[in-house]
Amino acid sequence: MRNGSQAGKSHVKSTNGATGQTSSLKAKVDILEGSAQDSYTPIKSLNTFLFDWKIKARVTKKHNKKTWKNIRGQGTLLNVELIDSQGTQIQATFFNEQADHYEHRLVENRVYLFANGQVKMANQKYTSIKNDYSIVFDKQSEIEEVDDDASIQNRGFCFTTIQEINDFEQMRTIDAIGIITQVGILTQVNIKQSGAVKDRRNICIADESNLSIQVSLWGANARTEGYSEGQVLALRGARVSDYNGKSLNSGDEHSQMFIDPDHRRARELHNWYEYHKSNLSLSSVTINTSIITNGTGIATTNCGLGGAVGSGGERPDNFKFAEELIEELLNPVRSSQSSGLAPFLSDAAKQQTKFYKISGFVKMIFNDEKILYLSCPDCRKKVIEEDGSWRCENCSKLHETNLPTYMLSALISDVSGNVMVQFPRELGDSIMNGKSATEFKEMKDEF
Ligand SMILES: [Zn+2]
């Protein structure tokens, strides 16, 4: 009985093994036959274990060649973005001599066959392309231009919603799309760190979540004319900024923009806007923006028009009660503590910058020595007194003057409880009834 059952087991096992082998062999044959038929590997089936592949793809974006530097040395790199006939995108990188070699051979919008690259895990922080993998092409790689293939679309997008952007960390690269709700005029901005003057245009876009966000277009993207309300603006490779809540930056060196692109999302947004534009109630994830438009001078603060609570009790703008807010902010910290990571080093803690709306009254302002600091007139970082001048470590410069700057903390209270909120810089003015940090310091010094 016992022997029999063992024999039976081992018999079953070997049968399974044999069947497994047969089916995996068959699968291999299928792949080979399949690839012989349509010749090319879909980008979506690339992975680090697949070596013998050949993709046919369009170069949708060729970035400017960059220099890299780390402890192992320095060199140049060239990033390109590829898309295949199934609409799957992937980023590819060329280093050093390969970057020089392919910089002018690859042309945006043309179609190529690519083989013999190394498939690697992608660093998603620096690309809007949603692919777990990226490709590094080296001197073994084969790249050959072929005739244009209309089955490969001109541009791939991986759109994120404005709601999703609200959860992303600073400097994350994304594709965004929305209806233009406000167009600012072209302005020139002094970039204090480099001394350069750059063109900038602020625009607000909104989507079906009834959220809006401010986009700062820079350089050639800002100089483009012909934006108007109700158009769809699509951005490839825009960068998330934590400036004033959440906003986006789109400079011509890293980001492409398209007005009313031929894309399903653009049509959806147009339909939504047509239906709702007469009673649009938007909430902005960017706070304290003042967009100067052609028509009326300074238009409004906030891209949105107010309307904190959406219909049916939804709160699309992340409105929270104090108690909920504290609970939500503490959760990732708690889970990282139980995982043994220092809370402020954990990814969860790093990604916590997020925009919330809270409604309450100022219960108390902490009038301690931290309420204001003396800042550098250029970069607003803290300065140290040095023989009657003010040294900024950040700009490594001595300044004649300093700028008193708020970093005040206040206890905001609502029905659920209290939450301590910091009000940096000019945000402190409104808490102090419009009194600037300079005025407040003068008053304080008199006592
Ligand atoms: Zn400075």
Image (cartoon, rainbow, N blue to C red):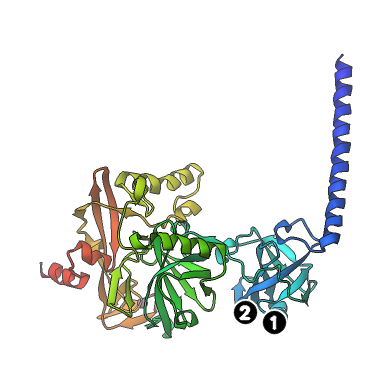
Provide the residue designation for mark 1. 100
Circle 1: residue type = Asp
Provide the residue designation for mark 2. 65
* Residue 127 in which image quadrant: bottom right
Rendered location of residue 392, percent (x, y): 35, 76
The residue shown at (70%, 65%) is 84
Q: Is residue 11 above or below residue 374?
A: above
| Distance of label 2 from label 1 (alpha carbons) | 8 Å
* Residue 433 in which image quadrant: bottom left
In which quadrant is the N terminus drawn?
top right
The residue shown at (44%, 77%) is 227
Residue 74 visible, this orientation? no
Circle 2: residue type = Lys
Rendered location of residue 262, percent (x, y): 57, 69
Pick the residue in front: 19 or 345.
19
Residue 9 visible, this orientation? yes
**Horizontal arrangement in the rendering, residue 367 relative to residue 178 (left or right):** left
